[in-house]
């Protein structure tokens, strides 16, 4: 039995998590229990746990992961300010007269919210409380409407900026560097979050397109499932549509544009997004709206002008024009600060800031506690010989590199029934991805394929997290069976989207190669 302790460890982890005990404590508890069990049977060196301190330090000093709480705060501010509900209402009135029009609007809003928040739970709950009752009143089939809401909410996993992509970028970059070390290369190349954001953009849009095509076809084939909205609902005017869509679209351009354009790191862009969401929420709350809007314009102008005409006041050879320009920049910064303070005042008075900060702290603590616990779990798993077992198993599977990846995808899909994307990303993927990269798979493409697979886990019963989120927010007439059956067609569409990226890798690799002027060579190409 002692030679199979690593396998028993994984089984014990699944049992502990399914028992309902907090995930981070389950992971760490199982790791400690099996570490001492392995030490008692003489199959593990307990001193290996001494490396856990280094892993903790590496986590808290990781510049990439600092972006997570900022992106979470950005999403929480947009959710608490009810901007998402305004967007849903406006888009619903814009497309509602079409067969399947409400479904189209929900998917489009889900894509916009995904690109501006990246938080699955917040998106699913917001749409479950506002869009789902509207769809049911319009006569939509409960299964269809539930599936559309669940699926649109999960777009926050694949469309950047996304918490999953940030974690995955860190995991895949480490795996890629490990693979290069094992090839005997000591001048190693790293992967950035920006590359993964660029790689995920086209596959995310492909998934949105597949959802829209399905809804349109379903509306044409079975019009009774998705009838047009009531005719007496007022059509949204062009001004209303622009007012609802412009703020989140501008926020998306500010965040993603600064990252993909090389103007800011993901952490800096996340702080821009958080400030932008605060200004949007503060302006929506009413008081001092004009000041906040003027301040937002001032900050945008400051960023553009300072990028085009930088001023170095500390230099001794600058002229009077530079002093005038510097004074203008300082004035714009002060005006922007006043607008931020006004937005903060509005948010505090409406208790929006307090609620957003609480949800941000809760989610961030959960993510980082899970990552820390997973670090201990992987240490023990390696100490019990699990890493060698995984490498040997992947290298000897029939079908070579393709067979190894197919089996890995199947395992990740099945594990997704039971574990969250964070646990899978930080426990399972570090064990398999270095070997898969060594077998010849492009790390960027591999990361996006796995991201689509992990996104699918949010929809798969019985433990899909989006299903649970919707179950908690859905009206009483929506049954659990409706939610499960409604998500089934979209799981097939997810598989089709993954297959398209598999067959045409350029869907994931073309955009980062264009933006970053660099294509990551695969391990196989480097060893030829």
Image (cartoon, rainbow, N blue to C red):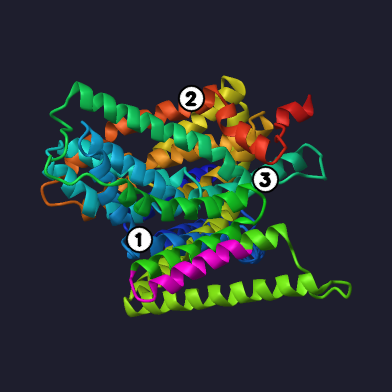
- Real-space Cα separation, disc 1 to disc 2, in angstroms: 33 Å
Q: Is residue 519 left or right of residue 241?
A: right
Q: Is residue 178 left or right of residue 386?
A: right
Q: Pointers 3 and 2 in contact (CB under 8 A)?
A: no
Q: Is residue 368 visible?
A: no
Q: Which mark's residue is nearer the viewer, 1 or 3?
A: 1
Image quadrant holding the C terminus, namely: top right
Question: Does residue 286 show up magenta in the picture?
Answer: yes
Q: Secondary structure at mark 2?
A: helix
Question: Does residue 209 show up magenta in the picture?
Answer: no
Q: Secondary structure at mark 1?
A: helix
Query: Which x, y percent locates residue 313?
Result: 79, 74
Upstream in sequence: badge 1 or badge 3? 1
Within-10-Å neighbours for mark 2: few <14, some 14–19, many 20+:
some
Within-10-Å neighbours for mark 3: few <14, some 14–19, many 20+:
some
- Compared with residue 278, is residue 163 higher up or lower down, i.e. above or below? above
- Real-space Cα separation, disc 1 to disc 3, in angstroms: 31 Å
Q: Which residue is mark 1?
A: 79
Q: Residue at x 56, y 66 (%)?
A: 299
Give the numbered dot on residue 500: 2
Which residue extends farthest right?
Answer: 317
Upstream in sequence: badge 3 or badge 2? 3
The one nearer the camera, 212 or 97, is 97
Q: Residue at x 70, y 36 (%)?
A: 520
Q: Residue at x 28, y 47 (%)?
A: 237
Q: Which residue is mark 3?
A: 191
Tell me the quarter of the picture where residue 66 sits: bottom right
Q: Which residues are magenta?
A: 285-302
Q: Pointers 1 and 3 in contact (CB under 8 A)?
A: no
Q: Which mark's residue is nearer the viewer, 1 or 2?
A: 1
């Amino acid at each position: 039995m002692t030679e199979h302790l690593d396998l028993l460890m994984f089984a014990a982890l699944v049992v502990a998590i399914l028992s309902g005990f907090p995930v981070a404590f389950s992971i760490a508890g199982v790791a400690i229990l099996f570490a001492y069990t392995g030490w008692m049977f003489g199959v593990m060196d307990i001193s290996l746990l001494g490396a856990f301190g280094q892993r903790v330090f590496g986590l808290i000093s990781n510049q990439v992961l600092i972006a997570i709480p900022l992106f979470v705060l950005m999403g929480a501010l947009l959710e608490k300010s009810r901007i998402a509900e305004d967007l849903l209402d406006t888009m619903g009135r814009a497309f509602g007269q079409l067969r399947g029009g409400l479904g189209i609007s929900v998917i489009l809003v889900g894509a916009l919210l995904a690109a501006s928040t990246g938080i699955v739970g917040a998106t699913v709950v917001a749409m479950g409380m506002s869009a789902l009752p509207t769809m049911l009143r319009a006569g939509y089939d409960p299964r269809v409407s539930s599936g559309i809401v669940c699926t649109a909410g999960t777009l926050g996993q694949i469309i950047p900026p996304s918490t999953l992509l940030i974690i995955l970028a860190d995991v895949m970059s480490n795996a890629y560097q490990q693979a290069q070390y094992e090839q005997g290369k000591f001048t190693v190349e790293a992967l950035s979050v920006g590359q993964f954001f660029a790689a995920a953009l086209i596959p995310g849009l492909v998934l949105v397109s597949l959802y829209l095509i399905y809804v349109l076809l379903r509306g044409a084939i079975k019009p009774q499932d998705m009838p047009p909205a009531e005719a007496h609902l007022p059509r949204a005017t062009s001004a209303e549509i622009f007012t609802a869509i412009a703020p989140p679209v501008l926020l998306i351009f500010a965040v993603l544009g600064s990252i993909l354009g090389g103007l800011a790191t993901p952490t800096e862009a996340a702080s821009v997004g958080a400030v932008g969401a605060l200004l949007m929420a503060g302006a929506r709350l009413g008081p001092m709206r004009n000041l906040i809007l003027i301040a937002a314009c001032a900050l945008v102008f400051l960023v553009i002008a300072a990028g085009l005409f930088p001023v170095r006041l500390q230099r001794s050879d600058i002229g009077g024009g530079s002093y005038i320009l510097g004074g203008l920049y300082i004035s714009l910064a002060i005006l922007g600060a006043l607008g931020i303070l006004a937005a903060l005042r509005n948010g505090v008075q409406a208790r929006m800031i307090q609620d957003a900060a609480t949800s941000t702290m809760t989610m961030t603590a959960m993510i980082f506690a899970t990552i820390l616990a997973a670090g201990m779990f992987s240490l023990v798993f390696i100490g019990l010989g699990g890493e060698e077992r995984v490498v040997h198993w992947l290298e000897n599977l029939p079908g070579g590199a393709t067979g190894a990846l197919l089996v890995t995808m199947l395992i990740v899909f099945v594990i997704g029934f039971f574990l969250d994307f964070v646990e899978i990303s930080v426990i399972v993927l570090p064990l398999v991805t270095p070997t898969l990269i060594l077998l010849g798979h492009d790390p960027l493409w591999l990361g996006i394929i796995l991201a689509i697979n992990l996104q699918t886990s949010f929809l798969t019963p019985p433990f899909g997290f989006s299903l649970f989120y919707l179950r908690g927010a859905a009206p009483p007439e929506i049954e659990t069976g409706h939610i499960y059956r409604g998500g089934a067609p979209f799981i097939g569409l997810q598989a089709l989207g993954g297959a398209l990226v598999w067959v045409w890798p350029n869907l994931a690799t073309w955009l980062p190669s264009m933006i970053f002027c660099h294509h990551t060579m695969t391990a196989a190409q480097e060893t030829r």
